[in-house]
Amino acid sequence: MLTMTPVAILYYNPFMSRFQIFSAAQIQSLRKGGAILRDCLKEVARQTVAGVTTGELDRIAEEFIRARGGVPAFLGYHDYPASLCVSVNAECVHGIPGERKIADGDIVSLDCGVIFDDLYTDACVSVLVGNVDPQVRKLAEATEQSLNAACKLVRAGIRVGDISACIQKTVEAAGFHCMHGLTGHGLGTTLHQFPDVPNQGEEGTGPILPPNTLIAIEPITSIGTEQIRQEDDGWTISSADNSPTAHFEHTVLVLQDGAEIIV
């Protein structure tokens, strides 16, 4: 039986020292944390129905994560007061859960993170509640499609700009916009680290991805403007024209010849 020596990466990566590279043991821990987060989001999405409060969804998420041995990654992060970000309609990201009741026709993004063995995972889904406007449904579908297309590109040796360009082209081809300034990111022993992963960009630009690093890819989109507005609570970010938005996110492990969606 012939054995093959692994082929060396045939490129120079000037950014290499800035990436966190994970061991086999750490990757196993990331998979376990990702499984907790994946199941958590499925359960919270199932309970995202008309009449439930965003605060109740946060309680469900925190209890689910802790019951399975994880730690809520967002709770207390830069003093964020909850385990879940719940952003409704024009709210893009970082919506603080509270007394607001979900209504029929809402689009609700559920963004959550888990710490397991001191490693972070991060993911988001957008839920369509009841009788949603067809354009909002189309927005959600295009946003998720852009995420899936970008994940299929990921492998060692591509540049961040390749991911950014793929997301932008997919979203704009559907007639929508990526929100300016809101990006994905690296993660691992911290929630946000090098590199930023923009949702707008040019192929062949940006840092080169090495194998066994981790990135969060998260297209955040709008029916209307790409401009954003910071709300008075200091956390919630909305579309500047109050048009509906969508948000999907995967934590992705970069491999030599492809990628693994951790969550």
Image: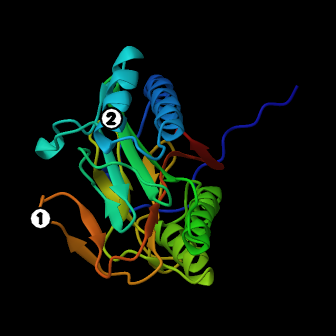
Residue denoted by label 1: 232
Residue that appears at 58% across and 79% down: 169
Instruction: Check disc 1 and report its element: helix, strand or loop.
Output: loop
On the rendered structure, is 95 left or right of 134? left
Q: Residue at x 57, y 43 (%)?
A: 261
Position of residue 15 relative to residue 44, above or below, is: below
Query: Disc 1 or 2, which lies upstream in sequence?
Result: 2
Which numbered disc covers residue 122? Answer: none
Q: Mark number for residue 56?
A: 2
- Which x, y percent locates residue 124? 45, 49
* Residue type at tag 1: Asp
Q: In the rendered view, does 150 fall on the left or right side of 210?
A: right
Q: Is residue 140 above or below residue 185?
A: below
Within 10 Å of the Cα at label 2, are there few (<14), some (14-19), or many (20+) other Cα atoms?
some
Q: Answer few, some or many: residues within 10 Å of disc 1's Cα (few below 14, many 20 plus, some between 14 and 19).
A: few
Seen from this angle, which residue lies furthest right?
1
How far across and down, in percent of the image, does residue 94 sit?
27, 54
Residue at 39% across, 40% down: 52
Q: Is residue 131 visible?
A: yes
Q: Position of residue 180 (x, y in %)?
A: 34, 77
